[in-house]
Image: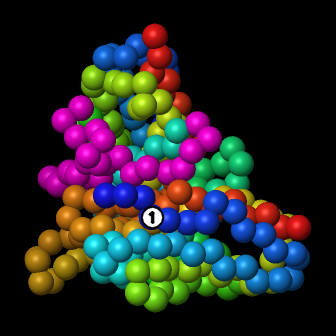
Amino acid sequence: EVHLLESGGGLVQPGGSLRLSCAASGFTFSSYAMNWVRQAPGKGLEWVSHISGSGDSTFYADSVKGRFSISRDNSKNTLHLQMNSLRVEDTALYYCAREPMYYDYIWGSYRGEYHFDQWGQGTLVTVSS
Amino acid sequence: QSALTQPPSASGSPGQSVTISCTGTSSDVGGYNYVSWYQQHPGKAPKLIIYEVSERPSGVPDRFSGSKSGNTASLTVSGLQAEDEADYYCSSYAGFNTLGLFGGGTKLTVL
């Protein structure tokens, strides 16, 4: 059974840092791209960041670019999100989400399928003074 | 990139059908067949119910169907059941570097 378990959330002051983790089990972790998606209290979903299965390709939403950094350790089946220079508007429940990949023979590389087929339960980040 | 546009609410009686729209632009919904839909019950994580416009993951009832015309995608829930009451979000690929553009969500009420 696929399982994604986020951790590392908490209360932090504006300008502070947090490192989120997502422990994966029940599937071959390196065969999937991974993403972080957040949801502010009472609001909708917002995609935050993507990392390829090998970890050599990353993308970020404009709202977090330059402040957040996504990484993965395939030997430990773990995904991370380093969040720096946190703002009040970063307050949200942060989900890690699995993204299937396919091999693109034209580009000669694996690419994401742009949907999220498994989600964790989320970890809450509160940015407040 | 602006969020995709969904109606804030939709409703229907048990057994009826309801359709939720998701409007974007030619740079996202209209430009790619990478539209997905997610169901979220209160206090729960989102669940994938439709991907690539109209594909259903295994285990998702065939009462859920997806389609697209131009810049607007649609989710239809047929034979409404009480457990379908939830928030529904659409999402689309929006080109290099914007991998998951979401709609604002639609709260579906089963009357």
Q: Position of residue B63 (x, y in %)?
A: 71, 83
Q: Nearer the viewer, residue A17 or A120?
A: A17
Left or right for B76, reference A88: right
Query: Residue drawn at (41%, 80%), measured in percent from left and top?
Result: B71
Image quarter in which the C terminus of chain B is found: bottom right
Query: Residue drawn at (47%, 30%), measured in percent from left and top?
Result: A91
Residue receiving disc 1: B4
Q: Which residues are the magenta region?
A: A41-67
Instruction: Give yes or no for residue A48 being in the magenta stretch.
Output: yes
Left or right for A61, reference B101: left
Q: Nearer the viewer, residue B111 or A106?
A: B111
By secondary structure, the bulk of the magenta-drawn segment is best described as loop
Left or right for B103, reference B14: left
Q: Position of residue A119 (x, y in %)?
A: 51, 53
Q: Position of residue A66 (x, y in %)?
A: 19, 35
Q: Position of residue A18 (x, y in %)?
A: 36, 23
Looking at the picture, does residue A49 appear above or below residue A12? below
Image quarter in which the N terminus of chain B is found: bottom left
Instruction: Give yes or no for residue A59 being in the magenta stretch.
Output: yes
Q: Chain of mark 1?
A: B
Residue B42 seen from this side: yes
Quarter of image, res B27? bottom left
In the rendered structure, which amino acid carries the disc numbered 1?
Leu
Looking at the picture, does residue B8 appear above or below residue B44? below
**SS category of the residue bearing label 1:** loop
Looking at the picture, does residue B35 appear above or below residue A45? below
